[in-house]
Image (cartoon, rainbow, N blue to C red):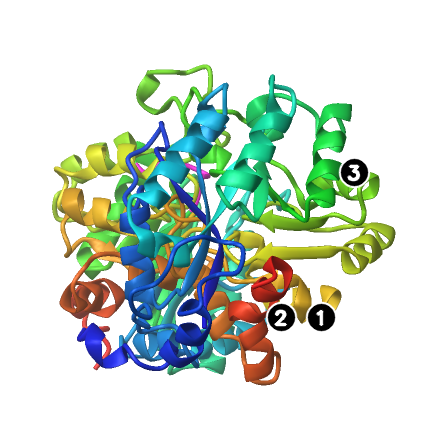
Amino acid sequence: MLIDINANTGHWPFRQTSCNSCRQLVARMDESGTDLSVVSNMNGIFYKNTQAANEELNEELKSDRSFNNRLIPFAIINPVYAGWKDDLDTCLNKMGIKGIRLYPLYHDYDLTDPSCVELVRYARDKGLIVALTLRMVDSRSRSWMDITAEWNLRDVIPIMKEVPDARYFILNIAGDIRLSQADTDLMIKSDTLMDTSGRSTSGLGNLISTYGAGKFAFGTHTPILDYLTGLLRIESLSERVADETIKDLLRAGNARRILGI
Amino acid sequence: MNRRKFFRNSAVSAAGMLSAGIPGLTGCLDSAPPAGPFSSSGNIMKEVMKYRKINTHEHVRPDISPGALIEVSDRLGIEKLVISSIVTEYSGKSATPQEFRDCNDLVLKAMKQYPDRFLGQAFLNPVYGKESLEEIKRCMDQGMTGLKVYNQVKINDPLFYPVIEKLIDLKMIILVHAFCGLGMGGHRPKYGNTEPNTSIPEDFAGVAKRYPEGMFQYAHLHGGGDWEYTCRILQDYPNVYADLSGSNNEADAVDFAVRYLGEDRLFFGTDGSHFQGVGTILSSRLSDAQKEKIFFCNYNDVLKRSGNHVN
């Protein structure tokens, strides 16, 4: 079984991408053997009112009943925008989300802004996963209208210190992944999954040695990154580094546990 | 590939859960989703291994053992690696003749250590014209098969002309470090290029026009630069090839490159990003035959011109 914890639909405004809809995503999943994908609508990165993007995704999911058994929706929530708590309740109670995605760099707030801390605590209390994406695109090839900043792994630590008992996805791990020993220990103790789409997970064997096999899961970052590199990082691991039991955790086992499915 | 024959392995475990629906989600499933080719027990690796591969852009350094390169290459079914050693802007060196000779000695040593795996490329700095031509002779006499140049001098600078003419005589390709950041072409100069002497697509166009019989390899098409812009500029210069190495494995880049450059002008490469190098080609919408060309045949055709091809 294979679960992708980092898929997106919607439009990336600076470059034409394929695989933008639920239908296209499911077709791609079928080709590559992905059974389930965690998905959100990246239009919400650019809408001021992110709830419109969550509603778009929900409408699309309702358009074909088979989508509901292949795609696990996450909502994009902006905690400094009006009505976010109502939005989150709606997404949870009427749209069946399993988590939320936050984009502080795009929505222009600090990860430890009191409203963000409140949101993460609220998500924790509701049993939702909080997904943080270190970057959407490589800033070297960004559009002149796109943001310039990217996160390193250490940049997500402050919110994990504020709310250590929330569950986290850390996605598209690029850039510097070095942490202090104290932060490494915090990451190990946390209930966190890091996906394999980002370039800094190429040394996956070493990362497993540091954090444990239970901290990683297959992710694609589709449609921004190619669909298979994240899987290749898992499947090409030597038997010495990861046997089939560990690979099964990376393919789906860890994702199933944290998603509760 | 016949996808149907793969639609079996993971269906059992997936169907067991999905037929009952995902807990917490609404909806029902008419039938279990088909299991694709890569879903179980590493079938993606069968797909990886079915293509012969020449990695056309890789480096050896004093701090990386050639054996480590061979180890990861074996895992990905990479048969041959075209290697060079270069003086970068981070080294604090200026690529003097002694420094580029030291780089090439490192490559020659690796070639001797793994003669069946490594194809060497010479590195030089054309600021030192006489010494560069002497170094080409020294390296090619010991079995190197091409040239790699970095950002000491732009490829269309007249300092490069004697070097290019020598490589034309040898029927060998020149791999040129490249970047295409925001503002290329003078449109938005406020962004500029982080490396002022790095060759940009327009520099390749200029030199390709001057030397239509030369062979130039644009390095790491999606190594962080704007690959759409690059392809649009290089479209009309058939003697400029591009390698698909680099860390930024954006979806659709390979298909876009084939659309603009054609399936015969692209090479597989890694430049240290081994998984991205293989994954991005594997993920493309190209046919098996097109992938074979990019993974192996296109570069082997280039090697054939100098009699250095792989059988």
Q: Is residue B260 above or below residue B302?
A: above
* Residue A169 percent location from the top left of the image: 62, 50
For disc 3, the chain is: A
Residues tagged by mark 3 and mark 2 found on one chain of the structure? yes
Q: Residue at x 47, y 34 (%)?
A: A140
Q: Residue at x 59, y 33 (%)?
A: A88
Camera sees residue B78: no
Q: Is residue B218 left or right of residue B195?
A: left
User: Which amino acid type is marked by label 3?
Assistant: Pro
User: Is the stretch drawn in magenta largely helix, strand or loop?
Assistant: loop
* Residue B207 percent location from the top left of the image: 22, 36
Question: Which residue bears the numbered disc 2?
Answer: A205
Q: Residue at x 18, y 49 (%)?
A: B258
Q: Are marks 3 and 1 in contact (CB under 8 Å)?
A: no
- The dot on residue A209 is 1
Q: Is residue A156 above or below residue A207?
A: above
Secondary structure of the residue carrying tag 2 is: helix
Instruction: Return the residue nearer the eye: B13 or B291.
Output: B13
Mark found first going from the N terminus, 3 or 1:
3
> Label 2: few (<14), some or many (≥20) within 10 Å?
some
Residue A115 shown in magenta: no
User: Which amino acid type is marked by label 2?
Assistant: Gly
> Label 3: few (<14), some or many (≥20) within 10 Å?
some
For disc 1, the chain is: A
Question: Over which residues does the magenta segment extend?
Answer: B150-155
Mark-to-mark CA distance, 3 and 2: 26 Å
Q: Is residue A90 left or right of residue B176?
A: right
Q: Is residue B172 left or right of residue A171?
A: left
User: Which amino acid type is marked by label 1?
Assistant: Ser
Question: Which residue bears the numbered disc 3?
Answer: A158
Q: Are marks 3 and 2 in contact (CB under 8 Å)?
A: no
